[in-house]
Image (spheres, coloured by chain):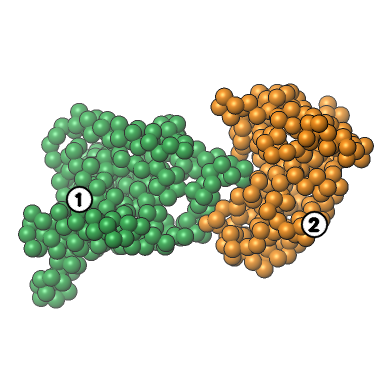
Chain colours: A green, B orange
Amino acid sequence: MNWVNTILQGVLVGGLYAMFAAGLSLIFGVMKLVNIAHGDLIVLAAYVALMATDALGLNPIASLIVVVPVMAGVGYALQRGLLNRTMGDDILPPLLVTFGLSVILQNGLLEAFSADSRRLQAGALETASLQLADGLSLGVLPLIQFGLAVAIIAGLHWMFYHTAIGRNFRAVSDDPRVAQLMGLNNRHVFAMAMALSLAIVAVAGVFLAVRTNFDPATGPARLIFGFEAVIIGGLSSLWGTLLGGILLGVVQAIGAEIDPGWQVLAGHVAFLAVLAFRPQGLLARART
Amino acid sequence: MPDAPLLHVEKLDAHYGDFQALFGVSLSVGAGQVAAVIGANGAGKSTLLNSIAGLIASRTDAIRFQGEPIGTLSAFRVVQRGIALVPEGRRLFPSLSVEENLQIGGQIRRPGPWNLKRVYEVFPVLEERRHQASMSLSGGQQQMVAIGRALMSNPALLLCDEISFGLAPIVVRDIYAHLRAIVAQGTAAVIVEQDIGQALAMADRVTCLQEGRVALEGRAGEVTRADISAAYFGV
């Protein structure tokens, strides 16, 4: 029963990793941009949630009403004001600029909020659980988090294949030059994709902040988990991203069960194994 | 200016970095007219169309459309003004179905006679295959999608870049029969083509480019084969 519990907890944490990864996967899929600042933007969302809960007295989950639109706005402005200027045939300029943005975000947050660890308090929800069997129970908060991750991935998939904006995303991804001939302003389409990515980041940031302590230096590790989930699942595959997140969560949970020091290492080993034996990822063809 | 041509290109230069591809090219197309642009590989035909379509920036008044300068407009704004390009090599969106490729052409919602139903009337085979992946169609059918996609924006001017490229002669004849029917309904066109016979058969005027310069310009009916050969090969 202990192992079943371990695997189930890993699956639920995997939902959070899938949320970290979904925004990365979306951005890479639409504009081939590798956002090195993604993890720091997750932490920024956590601080925005912290400010919203402090200033408005909101429950962290309710703060999503504020944090999601704020982060979407940040995403749109970031893409239109900065990242669009780096876009072109060469992938290096956006890589370098987002690396610089990562450094600026970390230092800006350090200046504004100090290096103290923070956490959002979700009250009774944090300890609420469902008893499935003797020695086997699932936390309500992780279940909500996992359910939201699945809903986000399903929603993104639906949007990509059944809406005009999804069609525009795919067209710009296929051929940005010809997409302009269809009347699409690529700069606006890219900015919409980044807004959507950071709306997902907002949800991930709030759940990160409820689940664990965070500080201005927390971002890079979240970026790595997000990258690992994307690579394990397959680049540009949305359902693969969920699968990658779940596998990463389960492997980390199993590693931790064997030895607490092996939690993160086990995830890295699984990631390297996928890179070595199936570098295109487990579900690389899911979106094609 | 009631007599102003629909499209007026005047002394257009175009560059790719340091390389100059067009040298003072001029071209006029009246409403409902068809202009053929011919020339050897590398003569600058596609560059001319890409400049008109806004994919290559030019001097603001080098290109005027319906009397307005459009030389510095981005491609997405040019199509909103009423110019649609059928690009060389068709360039369909591989991840979009046939119908989605057509729908995205019409997403600017410019008013006019063309819509999905009308495109399917002209190209019935596309309706039969509307849910298929666009790249699973034959070359001729893909060209129909590319033309239909451009028409969905209800253009006043259609730019066609080598629509016979890579297609069997019988398919080319079919595509041009459709194109003749389309322009007969009032859409002006600039046709860039290496298949000179097809281009001249439906053009009102012909312009021959050689190494980025206009080597010959005249009424299609008045230009002789010898004139074209001399301009085409520079002899």
Give the image location of residue A98, x and y in percent: 33, 36
Q: Residue at x 15, y 53 (%)?
A: A264
Residue B173: numbered disc? 2
Q: Which chain carries label 2?
A: B
**Looking at numbered disc 1 in the image, what kind of residue is underneath it?**
Val
Q: In this view, does A106 lie to the left or right of B194?
A: left
- Residue reaching furthest bottom? A133
Mark 1 burial class by Cα count in 10 Å: few <14, some 14-19, many 20+: many
Q: Residue at x 44, y 44 (%)?
A: A31
Foreground disc of the pair 2, 1: 2
Nearer to me, A28 or B176? B176
Give the image location of residue A212, x and y in percent: 16, 49
Q: Where does label 1 land, which residue?
A: A210
**Looking at numbered disc 2 in the image, what kind of residue is underneath it?**
Arg
Compared with A129, B54 (above or below) is above
Q: Which residue is drawn at 47% across and 56% down?
A: A160
Give the image location of residue A257, x and y in percent: 9, 63
Question: How far is disc 2 from disc 1 in space, using C-alphas?
Answer: 67 Å
